[in-house]
Amino acid sequence: MLYFERKGNGKETLVLLHGFMENLSIWDDMEPHLSENFSLLKIDLPGHGKSDILAEVHTVELMADEVKKVIDDQNLTKIHLLGHSMGGYVSLAFAEKYPDTLKSLTLFFSTYLPDDEEKKKQRIKSYRIIKEAFSNYARAGIPNLFNPNERDILEGKIETALQIALSTNNLGALACVKGMVERTDKKHVLENLESKILVLTGKHDNAVKTENTIKNLPDRTNIKSYVLDCGHNGHWEKPCICAEIINTELLHNMPKKLVL
């Protein structure tokens, strides 16, 4: 069973899935701003935080199945599911396999689009350094995930993200990178899911192609998208705004597309 923590007694359950080289503590800044109407279920994905490595390759489907085990263990039947980056990939796989479980799906600085060939090659090239020099890999990559125009302001947040990354088991990270290489196009999930779909993206996101993600969204009334003035880590860069959007969209309704 994956490690998880629950907080709050709200009627609506919001399941939070972190991204690559993260753990459930990434939600600490955003959590105080989330509505009391939410009961939070925060999960450490396989090979991250306090959750064990489960296989040589952590496919997004394998991770989705493990998330489902936690949800079943907690006797939850209808949830709001939000995933950051890799957690978004897992959320899409979950939505594909267990659509009836979802009240909503939120892609949080993530994408339904597959890696292009260049990104796949980059991931494959990273296998060796993740295995042999993980600290160098984390130190080189983490700062690039933040808005380059606000590096000085975000210095403390960057250090927090780096320390979380360095605490990650390198073999767990490797298993997840191998799984991300294998992931497929999930646009059909958004085309077919009847639940509410929320997409939050960043103007300065170097990990996700924001423009392509927004431009290619299916034109459906149950999908809403936001582009924020930040990088890949809205939970650290814009926690109040992100929480406000989540509260309003998942508990109420707002106009279809906004740029903040």
Image (tube, rainbow, N blue to C red):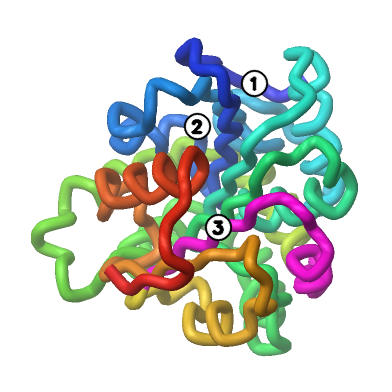
Q: Is residue 110 magenta?
A: no
51 or 4, which is in the foreground? 4
Query: Is 37 drawn above or below residue 206 in the view shown?
Result: above
159 or 222, which is in the foreground? 222
Q: Quadrant of residue 41?
A: top right
Residue 3 tag number? 1
Classify mark 3: residues with Cα within 10 Å, few (<14), some (14-19) or many (20+).
Answer: many
Classify mark 1: residues with Cα within 10 Å, few (<14), some (14-19) or many (20+).
Answer: some
Indicate which label's residue lies in the foreground, 2 or 3: 3
- The residue that disc 3 covers is 198
Q: Identity of the amino acid at label 2?
A: Leu
Classify mark 2: residues with Cα within 10 Å, few (<14), some (14-19) or many (20+).
Answer: many
**CA separation in Å, label 1 and label 3:** 26 Å
Numbered disc 1: secondary structure? loop
Q: Is residue 191 magenta?
A: yes
- The residue that disc 2 covers is 24
Q: Identify the residue at image location x=46%, y=43%.
A: 252
Mark 1–mark 2 CB contact (< 8 Å): yes
Indicate which label's residue lies in the foreground, 1 or 3: 3
Numbered disc 3: secondary structure? strand
Q: Give whichever of discs 1 and 3 has the lower sequence position.
A: 1
Q: Magenta residues? A: 181-202
**Residue 200 left/right relative to 147:** right
**CA separation in Å, label 1 and label 2:** 9 Å
Q: Is residue 161 visible?
A: no
Q: Of all residues shown, which one is farthest toward the right?
A: 97
